[in-house]
Image (cartoon, grey):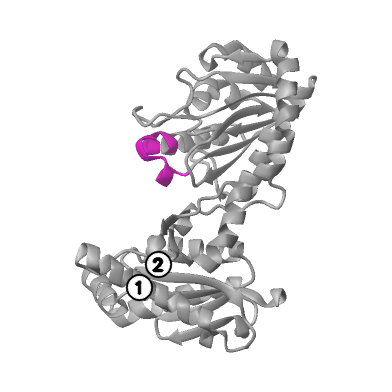
Amino acid sequence: MEQNKKFVVHLDILGFDQQAKQVEKIHGVPSWRARKNVIEKVDNILNAHIKGDKYAKKTSSDSWMVLFDSINSVLEYLKNVKQSMEKEYNLISLETGVTYGNIECDEFWLTDEAIEAVNICKKYRELYRSVHNDFPRTSFTLIHATAYKELDVLAEKFGLPTGNKIDKLEVRVYDPSLYNPPHENMVSFNEFKKEKEDIEKLIKVEKAQISLYDPAHLGDTFEKLIKGSKNIDLYLYTTETFAITYREILKKHQGVSIRILTIHPDYAEEKRTAVSNCIELWNEIYSLNRNCKISIKLYAHPPSLRGIIFDKNEGFLGIYKYDPNHHFRFVGVENNKLIHAKRDTEFGRFILDLYENRFEYEWENSKKIELQSKFYS
C-alpha cells in the first residue's frame, strides 16, 4: 500500500555515558546536566519537525525512533540536529539509520523497518571496528538501500549529494550538513536541460551585445550608477573592494537603500578578518549617514554567485572561481570578468532575473545582523 510508505529514522547518542563525562571534564558541566541538555535539544528539534505523538518514539534515555513522510524532511531534520550538536555540544556524537517501507501499524518502532534501522548502525560499528580496531567516535548517518533509492531521485533532480556507498552493508554513509533543501520554485536539472538549447540560442543571439568587464576598471561606471540608484543589491564574498572604494560616496548619498549578502565570518576561513572589518565599515557608513539605509545578512556556505545590481534594472554579474591553489581559494576580482547586464535585452532580463531570484532566496534564508551607531545615540 503506497500510501503507508514512510521513512523510519533511528537516532542514538554514541557512548552517551562516556561522552557526557568527557563534557564534564572539559567544560565543567555536570554529566547529568550535559545529558539532560542534549536530550532536550534533540527533543526540541524533533518537535519542530514532527506533528503528533504517533510519529515519534523515545526508545531509551538516549535514542529515538521517528517517522517521516519525505526524504526532504528526514535530511532537514538530521541536518538541524547535527548542526546544533556541533555548535553547542561538539563532543557529542550521534548515529543515525534510515530505512523506508510500508508502515501499517501505530507501533512503528516495532516494525522490520525500525529494527533494520538499528541493525545497520550495529553492523557499521562492527565493520568500522574490524578496520580501525576502535569504535566510531564521530557522528555518522546511514541510509539503507530501501531509502537511498528515494534519495537518488532527489539528488538527480536537484543535484544533491548521495553519500558514499558501502555495498557490503547495503547502505550509504551520508553527511547531513551537505544537504540544502530545494526551494519550492527551484528549477530541477531535468527542467534546465529542456531549456538549455533555448538558453544557448539566447547567448548566441546576444553575444555581440554582452559586455565583459574587469572589476578593477569600473570605478567611474560604478560611481555614476551608485549616485543615480535608489536600491542596490550586493551579493558578494566580503564586500571589501566595494565598501572601501565607494564609502565616501555612500556617506553622502541621500535616499539609497542597500541590501548586502556577505559570507558569515565563521565560513570565511582566510578572509574572516576582512569580512568582520567590512561589517564594521558598513556600520561606520550607516552611523554617518542615516539616509543610507543598509541591511546586512550573512550566508553560511562558500561563495558562489557574485552580483552588484542597481535598481533591479542593471547589474554586473559573475561567479567566484574556485582555485584550491589560491591563497583565498575563492577568487573574485582577480582575473575574473563580470557580465554587464541590462533589462533592455532578452538575455539581460534573463540573467538579471536569475541572479535576483537567487538573491531573494538567500535573503529569506540568511541571518540578519543589526548595525549600530558608534557616533550617535
Q: Nearer the viewer, residue 256 or 194?
A: 194
Secondary structure under the numbered disc 2 in the rendered image: helix
- Residue 46: quadrant of the picture: bottom right
Q: Residue at x 49, y 47 (%)?
A: 300
Say what amino acid the circle numbered 2 marks: Leu
- In the picture of the structure, the residue carrying the numbered disc 1 is 123
Residue at 68%, 43% in the rendered image: 190
Magenta residue span: 264-275
Q: Which residue is denoted by mark 2 in the rendering?
A: 169
Residue 270 falls within the magenta-colored stretch: yes
- Percent position (x, y) of residue 293? 64, 37
- Contact, CB < 8 Å: mark 1 with mark 2? yes
Image vertical order of residue 116 relative to residue 71, above or below: below
Q: Please state which amino acid type lies under the numbered disc 1.
A: Lys
The answer to which of marks 1 and 2 sits earlier in the sequence is 1
Q: Is residue 377 visible?
A: no
Question: On residue 304, which mark appears?
Answer: none
Instruction: Please indicate whether residue 204 sits to the left or right of residue 158 in the image.
Output: right
| Element under disc 1 | helix
Q: Quadrant of the N terminus?
A: bottom right
Q: How far is the residue under mark 1 from the one under mark 2?
A: 7 Å
Q: Give yes or no for residue 168 being in the magenta stretch.
A: no
The secondary structure that most of the magenta stretch takes on is helix
Question: In screen coordinates, is 21 left or right of 163?
Answer: left
- Residue appearing at x 28%, y 73% in the figure: 19
Specify the farthest residue to the front. 168
Is residue 109 or residue 28 the one in the foreground? 109
Where residue 268 appears, as percent x and y from the top left, is 41, 40
Query: Compared with residue 304, is residue 99 higher up or lower down, i.e. above or below?
Result: below
| Image location (x, y in percent) of residue 247 | 54, 24
